[in-house]
Image: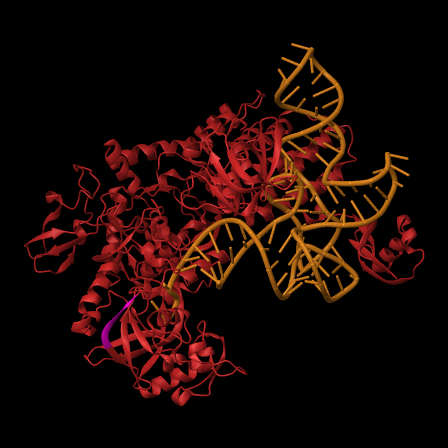
Amino acid sequence: MSRQAPLVPSLGMADYDFREIERRWQAQWETDGLYRSVVDWSKPKHYALTMLPYPSGDLHMGHWYAMTPSDARARMMRMKGYNVLFPMGFDAFGLPAENAAVQRNIHPAKWTAANIERMRGQLRTMGAMFDWQREAVSSDPSYYTWTEWFFREMFEHGIAYRGEAMVNWSPTLQTVLANEQVIDGRDERTGQPVVQKLMEQWFFAITRYAEELLSFEGIDWPDPIRAMQTNWIGRSEGAKVSFPTARGASIEIFTTRPDTLWGATFMVLAPEHPLVDRLTTPDRRETVDAYRTAAAGRSELERMDADREKSGVFTGGYATNPVNGAQIPVWIADYVLLSYGTGAIMAVPAHDQRDFEFARAFDLDILPVIQPDGAPPMVSDDMEEAYVGPGVMVDSGPVTGVVTTDAKGRANPSIAATIDWLEAEGLGEEAINYRLRDWLISRQRYWGSPIPMIHRSDGVVEPVPEEDLPVILPEDVEFEGRSPLIDNEAFLAVTDSEGMEARRESDTMDTFMCSSWYWFRYLSPDYPSGPFDPEEAAYWLPVDVYTGGAEHAVMHLLYARFFVKAMRDMGHFDEVAKIMEAHGKDPTGLFDEPFMLLRNQGQILGEERVGDHLVIDGVWDGERLIAASVTVAEPGTTGGSISGELVRRTENVLQVATGDRLVAVEVAESATVDIPAIPGTNDITQLRHHLDVQRMSKSKGNVVNPDDLVAAYGADTVRTYLMFAFEWQKGGPWDSRGIMGAHRFIEDVWKLGTHEYVSQGSDGDDDLRRTVHQTIAKVDEDMQAFKWNTAVAALMSLRNDLNEARRQANVSAAVWTEGVETLVKLLAPIAPHVTEELWRRNRAESVHVQAWPEADPEVAREDTITMVIQVNGKVRDRVDVPASISDSDAEAAALAAEKIQPWLEGGTVRKVIARPPRLVNIVVG
RNA sequence: GCCGGGAUGGCGGAAUUGGUAGACGCGACGGACUCAAAAUCCGUUGUCCGCAAGGACGUGGGGGUUCAAGUCCCCCUCCCGGUACCA
């Protein structure tokens, strides 16, 4: 740590006074209303949206990284003649505010408002073109009125419903969570374990849209996001089959392998399955109850461990296999989940690995019904694992002999044949099952939008009348950990529609509900008669470009799609469509998806750090130490074979400075690694991860605060650097030294624009103009494609050429001016302040309303091109040729090239491949 | 395990349809300026051999297709993200 360079290096003063320039222009733009966007049907619109922040208190580097390129692109679109809407707001409900209330005794509303105020100021320092008159704050009653209203609409249309289900309960947060918010059995925010609980809660029927959500037609979204959503929805094809039992009830199962029905030798129900009680025989009662209790006590985390030994108990009950009448025992086991399919399975141990393991553990029958081609018949006793490959069906009644392949669903002949037969016999039917569950939106929290429902004394649940919305959160509440709404009499006591005493719903909504429609509120944040003004919506919708983090792939981005589809089906866009048509805009397909084009940025990680203190044990192999154990320890700790400071790392090899010498340490794959900062078992992977790429976090002391950078270099430099230094979709570790390159660039632009140019010739005119127009084309293309780094590189390159032209003084004044002004205009979206200052030196209008430069292909065209001459595929010479050179001339030029001659000696030219004007390859043999 | 993405100089990263690998920047090295440092300016910078001219090698590893492969095909390793007793 002692070697670490300062995160913000100091800087000498120059005559480019960014502090004054940025402050002045930000104020001026606001006064001029430069970023106000108003409906104007005479101009094409562009709705650019970037994910709104949670008001945590400080704008961090991630916000800058996400927002400034989006801002730059929005600015470019405006210069291209679009009427651009680029709004901003705050996703202001959520747990951190409540935690602050508990810990610091500040009311969540106050804490949130203060944070928002602070972040607004920080956002302004970005110089982004946000239209602040369209700002929306989700915790504001004028906003959450409509969140509640949407809930009410969902309820009226049967999409919101109250249901009892096994839910994810977080004891830490004292609330339930959506499936999407549980990661590896832990709550995604705090990482604390989540337990399963049977509770009555509010749900949205997102599963009704499962099939439609699988289609991404008409939208341009990144493949990884589409894949993640597709996996999350988890469609599988198969059949539903009913297994009758002696006790009346039938067990419904879903299977993707109906063709293995004849091999079903037992059944397994989830321990919580409602039929368990009915099927359990008196002699098994005690065992079954004990197992169920034990299963309920296990956390989701434990239950998910697939390596665990299979456990389960026999219920004493039997079911009838409908395809062959076999009586098969019914077990319960926790490897069957109530939440997937029907919560019950037919077990085919011969052809399903989990069932196989279960059967072996409890000595149940294994009956092969698929034989691999050409192999001797399988004998169950000899099987070591389930056979899941292709083959031919055996012992399978009417479908015996049918071929089975690796294909899924009806594409597999055996599955198709079985389904047809089941349907003909009335024993089952083709079915599609989804992994997606309905969206659980209830939260037992205070700081969220109230669910506007009333529980009547007769058990009926009715919505709060529309005219009584919003249900306002009570202000005088105490925070002690659990929701203060639960026992707040003043809040809870209401009268129902029949004048009877009733209880108000005390749950609030998942905050993802607020962010599922916020881009509609931006259109008209003060509109009193609906969630959005249809006139505004008709012009601006849909969102053309949406940018944000990929971490929202299966939460926000899936919910947002669902929400829009539900709104469409509830008729919320009917009026909008009429207005669109009146203006000649075809509404077809505009309300099926919220965001037409989506791009995700990566993450900025903490600065690569050397200097961790390591204590290492191992054996010398003569040259280096092969580590058997590595411990990341407090500085100064001694012990082990060596101890010292990490200097650098390449793959598994560490260089450690111990006293006065450097020691190379190879960390064996099997080495034990102990990193106190990373709980659990660590190995070389964690070590690598810890040593160079890590998230910025206060505890690691590697947080780079954008405010400091802005103070040191100016917002223009920070913006430019963030757009230049990374591949945007990928992100990467912060490099505090690299920012100097961006700063030098901005200073150079300043000098180009402010220092006088004295022309002494015009020999360089054609070359410079060619470069200028090629740069226009390149920057335009790259900005459209979200390739900011190469766009900035092209601008830096133009800077280099202009510097060179100044040195040579070989371009005319007019060409010089064209070059500098083009650079200023192309850079304006990226570095809005310095470009404005330069532009306004002799212009009255803002650079940000100038027309985006257009490349002239004639000027940009190269007339001489360096042609590469290869011999047998290896570059041996280069010659300058006219761009229009013919095949034969190119060939002749290549064969005549001086440096080629030695390579032609002693062989004959067998073939010449001419690709003029770029390349000629001579094959000599 | 499955799905998706990836591996290019010391580092971040460039390279239309296969056609000059390493643009642009950082860092490093040498020089100028300075009492000195910072800043700034000029130059060098993939590796190896060579005084040079030049040559050989080079895009995670191994095969292949092609006149030509970072790019296409097959196999493998590793990294990142997602997901998982999913029936």
- In the foreground, A755 or B69: B69
- Residue A205: % across, % down: 29, 62
Q: What residue range appears in magenta?
A: A312-317
Q: Is residue A370 left or right of residue A835?
A: left
Residue A100, placed above or below residue A173: above
Which chain corresponds to the colour orange? B
The spot of residue B55 in percent (x, y) is 84, 47
Based on the displayed image, in which of its 4 quarters is residue A303 positioned? Answer: bottom left
In the displayed orientation, state which residue is furthest to the right.
A906
Q: Residue at x 40, y 83 (%)?
A: A418
Chain depicted in red: A
Establish if B56 lies above or below A758: below
Q: Residue at x 30, y 39 (%)?
A: A96
Q: Residue furthest left?
A: A500
Left or right: where A162 falls relative to A458: right
- Report x, y in % for residue A739: 56, 32
Above or below A495: residue A351: below
